[in-house]
Amino acid sequence: MAGAAFLAGALMLLTEVTTVISVELESTRCEVIYDSSPELADDCSQKGFERHSVALLLLGLLTFAMGAGAAFGRSRPAAVALIGIGTIVLLLALVRDLPAADDAGLIGRQYAQASAHAGAGLWFELIGGLLAVVAGLVRVIRPED
């Protein structure tokens, strides 16, 4: 249980620095856009920090603390907090990031051949949220372990 909570927190932290959504151009590279429109080119690769500010950083650190409380202190409130944290992360991923993974945004409006794709950060976010929920549920269901 402690391992799952630790991994969940680590994945949330990793999401902050990895690409959640990337936009690719069929006939050219995003670097070419920097010359004509640098603010538009910034949307070519969106990292977790750009999508969520410090939310996943804070939630990841909180996951470490609540995971330690649930695993080593056998705290049910900490386990419930883990479930809540994981749910928040899953909602961020499923409601905010996953729908945007297919949307090329402003780049797609100006370049017809643009396409958006989910990056590794989206998967880290989903798996981290799911692990936090599972770690919390394990402690709530089996409090004496």
Image (spheres, rainbow, N blue to C red):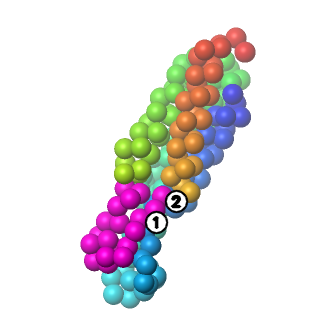
- The magenta stretch spans residue 139: no
What type is the residue that disc 2 sits on?
Gly
Residue at x 66%, y 41% (from the top left corner): 7
Which amino acid does the dot numbered 1 rest on? Answer: Ser
Please tell me in which quadrant of the rendered image residue 114 appears.
Answer: bottom left
Q: Is 40 above or below relative to 88?
A: below
What's the distance in space between the residues labelled 2 and 1, CA to CA? 6 Å
**Extreme residue toward the top, this view:** 144
Q: Residue at x 37, y 56 (%)?
A: 100
Q: Residue furthest left?
A: 109
Q: Residue furthest bottom?
A: 35
Q: Which mark is residue 119?
A: 2
Query: What's the residue at 38%, 88% (across, down)?
Result: 35
Q: Position of residue 102 (x, y in %)?
A: 38, 59
Residues at discs 2 and 1 in contact (Cβ within 8 Å): yes
- Measured as percent of width and height from the top left, residue 53 is found at 42, 54
User: Element at badge 1?
Assistant: strand
Q: In which quadrant of the rendered image does the N terminus lie?
A: top right
Q: Which residues are magenta?
A: 100-118
Residue 130: give x, y in percent of width and height: 55, 36
What's the residue at 60%, 35% (across, down)? Answer: 131
Q: Where 46 sits versus 4, above or below?
A: below
On the image, numbered disc 1 is attached to which residue?
A: 22
Determine whether, in the image, residue 135 is placed left or right of residue 94: right
Q: Is residue 134 visible?
A: yes
Q: Residues within 10 Å of mark 2 (few under 14, many from 20)?
A: some
Residue 13 seen anywhere in this rendered image of the structure: no
Disc 2 secondary structure class: loop
Question: Which of the two residues, 57 or 96, is positioned nearer the viewer here?
Answer: 96
